[in-house]
Amino acid sequence: MGLLDTWRGYRAQQKNRSLEKLGDTLKNQVTTKEQRWEAIEALADSGDFRQAAPQLMKRFELVVDHGIVDKREKDRVVEILVENADLSRPLVCEAVRKQKRIAWPIKIAEKLLPHEGYLELLLESLNTEHVLFDESLHERNIELLLALRELSNPRIIEKVRVLLRSRDEPVRVAALECLEAQAREHDEARQCLKELLAEPLTDDNSRFIGLVKAIVERHNWSSAGPK
């Protein structure tokens, strides 16, 4: 390797470190809103968005106390990522599949992907294993179910049916709300609600079955088809 190649490698390393430092500013609780905003704009104008994008994504790891400021900064990051969709898309999809906090990556994915691709990403990211003590996994599943609740597709029903048996009650409730949304258009989901109502009551499931009953009565689905 010649001196010129060595120099170029050194310059690239320096730039990468500089971008990483800006990214670390975005997830540091003790930074000011001015410091974070400056870091966001510096990353947007870095001239190397392939390296800057992962650093911008770090802003979604931090929640600041001032809700308006928090949303404003994250909205700006979303805007930048959407403007650079071709480079952002793989990174955002990977975040939805693997990161702990995915509410914002899901919002970006909806903007970056076609409808079918977005649906596929949400479905493949759901974890349907019966896990008891994994708070981050349960939080991920709840965020995914909330997003799926806004869509209509028979494929959602099978995934949701499994999560109705989750050992985590908030996941079960989120799955039930998602199933309710599907039942507005799909007979299979309405039938699933009826099957839940037919289960014997126990101390463990009485509250959940009560929620099912309230849904069925609210929509008059006990005998009629979905509206």
Image (cartoon, helix red, strand yellow):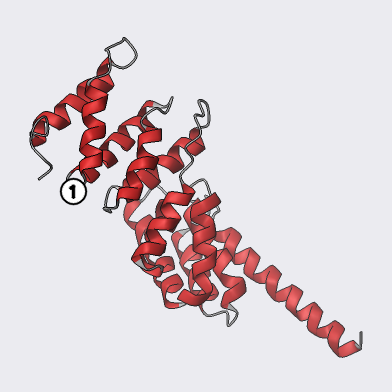
Residue visible at 34% across and 51% down in the picture? 67
At x 11%, y 40%, the residue is 225
Q: Quadrant of the N terminus?
A: bottom right
Task: Report x, y in % for residue 227.
Answer: 9, 45
Is residue 97 rendered to the left or right of residue 208?
Answer: right
Quadrant of the image occupied by residue 162: top left
The amino acid type, in three-letter code, at marker 1 is Glu
Q: Position of residue 98 (x, y in %)?
A: 55, 50
Residue that badge 1 annotates: 185
Quarter of the rendering containing residue 158: top left
Measuring from the top left, give residue 102's x and y in whole percent. 45, 51
Q: Residues within 10 Å of mark 1 (few under 14, many from 20)?
A: some
Residue 88 visible somewhere in the drawing: yes
Q: Is residue 189 above or below residue 194?
A: below
The x and y percentages for residue 59 are 49, 58
Q: Determine the residue positioned at 54% across, 55% down.
A: 27
Q: Is residue 168 above or below residue 148?
A: above
Horizontal relation, residue 215 to residue 134: left or right: left
